[in-house]
Amino acid sequence: MTRKAQTQASGSTTLNERIAIGYQDLAKLMSHLQSPQTIETEGEGRCLFFQAFMAAAFTLWLTFEEVTQLQGKHIKFPESSSEGSPYFTVSMPFRTSNPLNPLQENVYEIYLQPDEPDACLVTKLLDWIQWSAQHNLDPLGDDDFVFPDIFSDDDDDDDDIQMDKRCSDTQVASMMDKYARDTGLIEDGSRLSTDCLRRGGAQHRLMHVQNRWLFKAVKWWGGWTDRDSAESVFEHILADSPRTNFGNMMSPQRTSQVGGDNIWKTVDALVMSDRLKAAIQTMETNNEAVAKLEKASQQSDRKIDQGFKDLRREWAEVKDTVSRAVLSLESGAAHSHNADNNNLTKRPDFPKIVHWKEAIQQWDKGDPKRGLDLPLCKWPPAWRKNSLSFYHRSVIVQEFELFGRDESKMRDEYGDLLSGRVMDLVSAIRDRRRDRKMQKRGVSPTHFIRPGRKPKRKLEEVEIEEEEDEEEEDEEEEDEEEEDAEEVDEEEEDEEEEKGGDEDDKEDEELEENDGGEKDVDVEYNSAEEEGSERPLGK
């Protein structure tokens, strides 16, 4: 049903909408967060954060508060099943609807979902974890929150993320409401319920997918116990906004306000307990038969899973699948879960660069002669993810634009680095950016520790300190060598003076013997005088 019909109300300025976010709604939200305009305004990190957040809530059937409690110790990867399919596991002892024994909480195996890329938790979560690890120069720890506080420090992308601080579910709910309004899912003044993605994911698996889940599987996945009756489970999953208006149900256009035949058939079965039990029994029988057929077919058709022996090492192949789906949406093509992935475009390779101006050229015009037909500035978000080559070129371009694209200013700032290695220039630019930010805050760059956080030095700071220590040691050694050299020179000069005096006396005696008197002798000194030796030359 349309969201406008669900948000109609009188008097109240803020409406709490108890609606379920289905897969189509989720696809709209994902497309919005992947658009270049949203990435430019919100930042790449925040967009990846909320894509992973929504995929986790939709796949694991969690409320906003439960998602924010996920930590690194709750996720184990990589692992692979007996068939070789890559997956990782998630445990949730904090789940409010978990069975009574928290020591035996359910462990969920999360696999790739190539037919539903917008709900694929494997791709979305690893995108976010990899970005945050590269941003902080520190991998996700067991006690780190998977979804930490990203709203502090005015969400400056250059600042470290406080992984040990849990994100506020209130702030998350506020941003979710904003994105839902931006995509037209709810109207201004309305708010989503915190379990909208939990119920949407349950409805999706129970009624909308081709291979619907068994009801007992739905109860297990959602954390319900055997004491929860079928009526109570269905009531929770299908509960809709109390402000929904059904006054036009007699209208021929009423289909614009209903969710489809499956929902109403399920509600009718809910009203009549006997029919509900019979429907559940029939569904379980049919799904068991479908599951057997599906298992047999999957053994012969696992093209996307072949070659995945190590999830981290082969992650690039997974990225291709996601990039292709995003490119299909951005080109305006109709979204289809069964589209042939081989017809979509693959991210091109980066031509190597040896000069910083080549990075500017690839960004502005590309490099068609070496296979880079599309300029980097026009690359879709999916191609930009997890690419250090793209990041290095973007760092150079951003610095060049900071100086108004004036090469003379760049040369004044970086000098000989412009003719050296590109990586040395990138490192220097990052150092300049960090120093500018610290100077703007009035903080010493070499002693920067964010207030309220445990001291945590970056690799660059450690390298700087090590280089300074080495320079001090070298200077001390040079001073000692100079002192020793001066002492040796003084001793040699004294010896030469004594030696020279003896030779002069000897020469005088010889001259007196040969000439019978004193004669003037002109003496010239060659270059050996610097070493303490002299050679007399008579005219």
Image: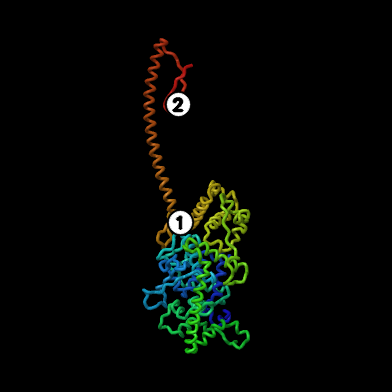
Name the amino acid type tagged 1: Val
Numbered tag placed on residue 528 in the rendering: 2
- The secondary structure type at the circle numbered 2 is helix
Tell me the residue at 57%/50% (across/down). 409
Q: In the shown orientation, is residue 441 left or right of residue 484?
A: right
Closer to the camera, 285 or 254?
285
Closer to the camera, 295 or 443?
295
Q: How many marks?
A: 2
Residue 11 occupies quadrant: bottom right
Residue 359 % position (x, y): 58, 53
- Residue 244 visible to the viewer: yes
Q: In the image, which is nearer the foreground, mark 2 or mark 1?
A: 2
Closer to the camera, 374 or 7?
374
Residue 523 % position (x, y): 46, 20
Numbered tag placed on residue 328 in the rendering: none
User: CA gap, disc 2 to disc 1?
Assistant: 57 Å
Mark 1 = which residue? 443
Query: From the viewer's perspective, is residue 48 above or below residue 97?
Result: above
Q: Residues within 10 Å of mark 1 (few under 14, many from 20)?
A: some
CB atoms of marks 2 and 1 within 8 Å: no
- Residue 199 visible to the viewer: no
Is tag 2's residue or tag 1's residue first in the polypeptide sequence?
1
Query: From the viewer's perspective, is residue 252 above or below residue 192?
Result: below
Q: Residues within 10 Å of mark 2 (few under 14, many from 20)?
A: few
Q: What is the residue that sits farthest to the top in this orientation? A: 516
Residue 5 % position (x, y): 58, 81
Q: Quadrant of the N terminus?
A: bottom right
Residue 383 % position (x, y): 56, 62
Looking at the picture, the colour scheme in use is rainbow
Name the amino acid type tagged 2: Ala
- The secondary structure type at the circle numbered 1 is loop
